[in-house]
Image (cartoon, rainbow, N blue to C red):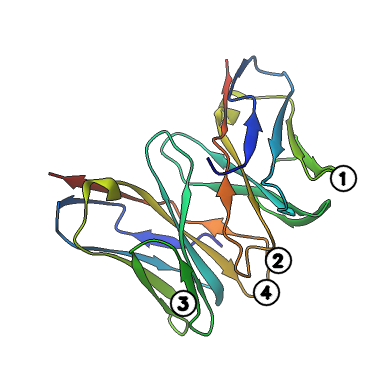
Amino acid sequence: QQPVQSPQAVILREGEDAVINCSSSKALYSVHWYRQKHGEAPVFLMILLKGGEQKGHEKISASFNEKKQQSSLYLTASQLSYSGTYFCGTVNYGGSQGNLIFGKGTKLSVKP
Amino acid sequence: DSGVTQTPKHLITATGQRVTLRCSPRSGDLSVYWYQQSLDQGLQFLIQYYNGEERAKGNILERFSAQQFPDLHSELNLSSLELGDSALYFCASSAGLAGGTGELFFGEGSRLTVL
């Protein structure tokens, strides 16, 4: 079941904030966030697990609401380097743990 | 450099043909994932292998098949190619299963053009 991301696209000025949302119609085991710059491979940002554990290595924060089956990625004080397409990926309960399904992506453009 | 190697980087072929895409995972990673990304589309999950065994299957066409070998490299075979198969095919690897703390490391992709 593909997660739904919103918005589809957002344009920011440097220093502005943005929130990208990801929702699933099924119970979530974990949520994964990746960023893909144009012409490059996706790069890992963060994993959020049921129970509150988070793992990431960027100065980007995210939340995971298990009851609502939703996750949000918070981009604060955006920089030009934040531009790219952000994908959330979900692993649902009841399916194979290897079944990491990505949403269609949110295209973020940060202007000077 | 993610440590995941995909070959070839670019491939142009004709409809009806068959191609094989190859992926070498990061050293020590047991899981290999295949994703298809068409123009302006998201990442479509195809299939996942863990230590040589198929563990998860997505929207992979019957014309496509994959396997993971004992040395952990993987191959994605695409046959009876159609124009719509033109896409960027990504391989990714992780130490375990994505449902745990499995960060995926993506290769640079193999761009397939079917004429």
> What's the CA distance linking mark 3 and mark 1?
38 Å
Residue position marked by numbered label 1 in the rendering: B70
Q: Quadrant of residue A1?
A: bottom right
> What's the CA distance linking mark 2 and mark 1?
22 Å
> What's the CA distance linking mark 1 and mark 4?
29 Å
Q: Residue at left 83%, top 51%?
A: B52
Give neighbour class at mark 1: few <14, some 14-19, many 20+ (Cα, 10 Å).
Answer: few
Q: Quadrant of residue B21?
A: top right
Residue position marked by numbered label 3 in the rendering: A69
Give neighbour class at mark 2: few <14, some 14-19, many 20+ (Cα, 10 Å).
Answer: some
Which type of secondary structure does the marked residue at label 1 adopt? Answer: loop
Which type of secondary structure does the marked residue at label 3 adopt? Answer: loop
Residue closest to the eye, B79 or B7: B7
Q: Which amino acid does the dot numbered 4 rest on?
A: Gly
Q: Which amino acid does the dot numbered 1 rest on?
A: Pro
| Pointer 4 or 3: first along the chain | 3
Q: Which mark is residue A94?
A: 4
Residue position marked by numbered label 2 in the rendering: A96
Q: Which amino acid does the dot numbered 3 rest on?
A: Gln
Asked whether the residues under marks 1 and 4 belong to the same chain, the reply is no
Tag 2 near tag 1, CB within 8 Å: no
Check the residue under mark 3 and report the chain it is in.
A
Check the residue under mark 1 and report the chain it is in.
B
> What's the CA distance linking mark 2 and mark 3?
18 Å
Check the residue under mark 2 and report the chain it is in.
A
Tag 3 near tag 1, CB within 8 Å: no
Tag 4 near tag 3, CB within 8 Å: no
Q: Residue at left 61%, top 63%?
A: B102
User: Which quadrant of the figure contains the C terminus of chain B?
Assistant: top right
B64 horizontally vs B101: left or right: right
Tag 1 near tag 4, CB within 8 Å: no
